[in-house]
Image (cartoon, rainbow, N blue to C red):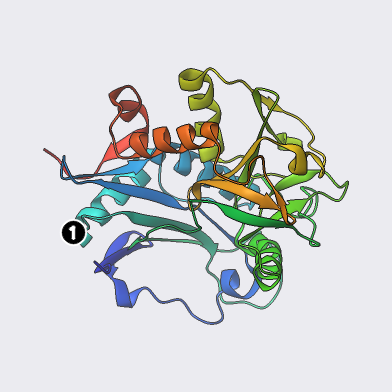
Amino acid sequence: MNAKELFMNGEFIPADKGIISVRTHGFAYGTGCFEGIRGYWNEEEQQLYLFRLREHYERLLRSCKILSMSLPYSVEQLIEQSTELVRRNGQHEDVYLRPVAYKGDEIIGVKLHDLRDDYILTSEPLGNYVEITGLRCGVSSWRRIDDNAMPARAKICGSYVNAAFAKTEALQNGFDEAIMLTHEGNVSEGSAENIFLYTNGELVTPAPTENILLGITRDTVIKIAERELGIPTRERPVDRTELYLADEILLCGTGAQIAPVIEVDHRPVGSGKVGPVVRRLQEFYFDIVRGKHPEYSAQWCTPVYKK
């Protein structure tokens, strides 16, 4: 159901009252940061689980630090605000929470210091962000922004214009998604997803130095691949042509979840179908996020509705 309320600057208010001025610094200059957090409905338990909520808010506060921002909330308070908002909205379905911290002053002039830091949290129903049965990708002509230009470790609002260029180019060229390279020509990530290649019996993924977002779903894939499938992950530079030779490829992120890639630059990945390793990772992931693995649920899944 559509959200009835949102949280803005210390209070829960009607969703249609969540308005900012057109003069807001964060709107004019992209001086804000955000998270995307998924909640998954478990029909059997009549419970909604917010996935890796703590890690998302820890990363939000790190992004704020990079942007010279300070929120008046602890991680515990941010977690409580999230569960309370979903309860207030009475949502019994898959949802997507978007906390945004932004410079709220209404001034002209680009800077980060001596500005007011505002905060808003919304919760909306959301299904699949990208196709999860097989993506056809194209390597983008747009390069991933460098950490010294726009820090990749922070989810900075303005930086997603870079992703938008790549995604629109891919869609207009007939692909489902883009794969971006660094300025050195190494594989970085998708338009808004981390990337893994399965090759020679191991997972390979670009290292943090390749201008990637340190993804929470990326970390989840690494952990479950090793613990449940016995597959190690190697973080290293990845050449573009390795995409053409990989046995399997996946893109992952909170929005994308785990999305198999079956084609890159009109070349089939492996057999051109979803491979067994990615399929097993995907199945295990969707069981975890819905609270079906108690050994993970206690650590990673925050229940919304109290029993």
Residue 191 in view here = no
Quarter where residue 44 is shown: top left
Quarter of the figure with the C terminus: top left
Q: Residue at x 38, y 55 (%)?
A: 97
Q: Position of residue 16 (x, y in %)?
A: 31, 77
Q: Is residue 46 above or below residue 220?
A: below
Dot 1 falls on a residue whose secondary structure is loop
What is the tally of numbered marks visible in this picture?
A: 1
Q: Amino acid at mark 1?
A: Gly
Left or right of residue 15: residue 104: right
Q: Residue furthest right?
A: 184
Q: Residue furthest front?
A: 271
Quarter of the figure with the N terminus: bottom left
User: Between 64 and 205, which is closer to the camera in this rendering?
Assistant: 205
Q: Position of residue 242 (x, y in %)?
A: 78, 39
Quarter where residue 171 is shown: bottom right
User: Between 4 and 140, which is closer to the camera in this rendering?
Assistant: 140
Q: Position of residue 188 (x, y in %)?
A: 73, 45
Q: Is residue 142 above or below residue 179?
A: below
Q: Residue furthest bottom?
A: 22
Q: Residue at x 29, y 45 (%)?
A: 80
Look at mark 1 in the image and give the residue it sits on.
Answer: 90
Density class for disc 1 (Cα within 10 Å; few <14, some 14-19, many ≥20) is some
User: Between 152 and 130, which is closer to the camera in this rendering?
Assistant: 130
Left or right of residue 52: residue 218: right
